Image: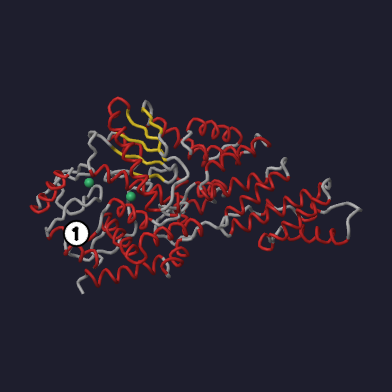
Amino acid sequence: MRRRGGRRYHWHAMNPPTDCARCGQRAVSEPVCPRCGVIVAKARDRRAVPREPQPPPAAFVEEDEPRPGMPTWSLAVMALGLGMAGFIGLRVWQKAHRPPPTPTEAAEPAAPGRPTVDAPPPSLGPPMYVPPEQLHVETGQLSEADRSKADDLARRQATPASITAADVQAAEDLLSRHADERGFRSLLEAVLISAATRHQQQHQFSQAIAYLQRAQQVQPASIRASLGLMEVAFQTGDWALAESAARAVIALDPRHFDAWQGYGYALMRQDRNREAMDALRTALAIRDDANTRSILARIEKGMADERGMAERRVSHFNVRYDGEEHEAVGREIVRQLEHHYATLASTLDFEPATTVPVILFTRDGYYNASGAPAWSGGAYDQIDGRIRIPIGGITTSLTSDIDGTLIHELTHAFIADRTRGVAPRTVHEGLAQYMEGKRVESMLTREQLRALADGRLGGVGGFYLGSLAFVEYLMANRGQGGINDLLKAMGETGNIDEAFRQVYGTTLQGSQRAWAERFRQQHGSV
Ligand SMILES: [Zn+2]
Ligand SMILES: [Zn+2]
């Protein structure tokens, strides 16, 4: 490895065209591989730096972005402004629960760059609330105080913002003093669900979950709390909880379409693909639905792409690869993945809850299976949570390049999990490269740094470099701890700007502007 690095340096000094170490593109003469965006060489060639100022790219094609062969529903979800990082299960879930678009909406192109609206904060929605009159308690034995308390709670449970912990306690008291009054049981359930909704809206998920689980106990024959739990679980990316909540609904209502669909999605995210397909087929037998068909088709394609592969299940990964050809490589990659996992867990101070599926493909198999652009050296898919990597032609001594790809894609998986899918693309790509050990100042010549600072490096390469420089700036500002706080805050608030404000005192855009200005001062022409 050392020798290889030395040789590469020598190449750079000489500056001849070179083959891209990442994607194999032949005779690359630019500093950034035109095919995969990886930095090929510290080229001093002036032609490498565009002379003309280029507008910043409007849309960044990159390894993580679904491309036009994707099912339309996912593009539609992206059009909601969720971007690459737009969704983990919840987004799919929300989309799945949205009424079908009207023809005019559907005609609107899913154009990136169009003013976008984030999905509304999830809530259990009006149907979850019980009309107050249904909660009226008919009993002659009530004190006036209890009766008016019950009436008050029945009225206010329809407005979650008004429900406090004291209200939950009051509803608990009423039921404990009138244990056989079924009306009080329904009232407590309604108050608990309402309180859970309030916490969910404030992103206080553990409180929401605790109230919903209590509601399940109070009213075991009702599916409402379980549906609420399923929704919170999707919002937080807790697939095991989503699975158990969906099961609970199905046990009470075996023909509940949403529960079967959610069950199937939660199983897919846990890499239990056959069960997932069965669940989704059951959902489709209850009701035909385009989104469900898309998810099913996606799993079926994944299964077909991975047919005949050997699998190695280790603590944090399910690694699949072509058994005969890549047994030794697979073993080595598992070893490296575990090593990178430990590094990321301690650096980011966090561990993803779910096992990460990693699928190693021959080169052709990869481009077919991942749907990634030709320049991509690996991909992390936020819809199914899987890492796909081409390993064609490599041997057991992993090149530093494949190793870089492993930690890069694994960083995406950590970020997606930590931020519950809301991290913006620039943070994703910047941090993933940073964790690879890349630093712009050691990758670029002074002239290239100047081009970057002046905003003259466009395209995929410019985006990756700018993202890396931005993350380096954030690191310089508040260190790794700041980055970790940022990711955590994104997951907790579900709001990128709010998270940036908490840690860096300004929005994402404000931070980017501050970085650009500083970077211009350091490296720019003026
Ligand atoms: Zn390349
Ligand atoms: Zn990436």
Foreground residue among 265 and 342: 342
Q: Secondary structure at mark 1?
A: loop
Mark 1 Cβ and ligand 1 under 8 Å apart: no
* Residue 136 rendering spot, x and y as whole percentages: 82, 54
Foreground residue among 17 and 137: 137
Compared to residue 395, the image places residue 15 above or below, namely below
> As shown in the figure, which amino acid type bears the numbered disc 1?
Leu
Note whether residue 367 is visible. no
* Residue 125 rendering spot, x and y as whole percentages: 64, 54
Outermost residue toward the left in this view = 14
Image quarter in which the C terminus is found:
bottom left
Outermost residue toward the bottom in this view = 526
* Residue 259 rendering spot, x and y as whole percentages: 60, 40
Numbered-mark total: 1
Pointer 1: what residue? 444
Q: Residue at x 16, y 45 (%)?
A: 2
Q: Residues within 10 Å of mark 1 (few under 14, many from 20)?
A: many
Foreground residue among 280 and 138: 138
Note whether residue 398 is visible. yes
* Residue 440 rendering spot, x and y as whole percentages: 24, 59
Q: Is residue 38 left or right of residue 193?
A: left
Outermost residue toward the right in this view = 140
Image quarter in which the N terminus is found:
top left
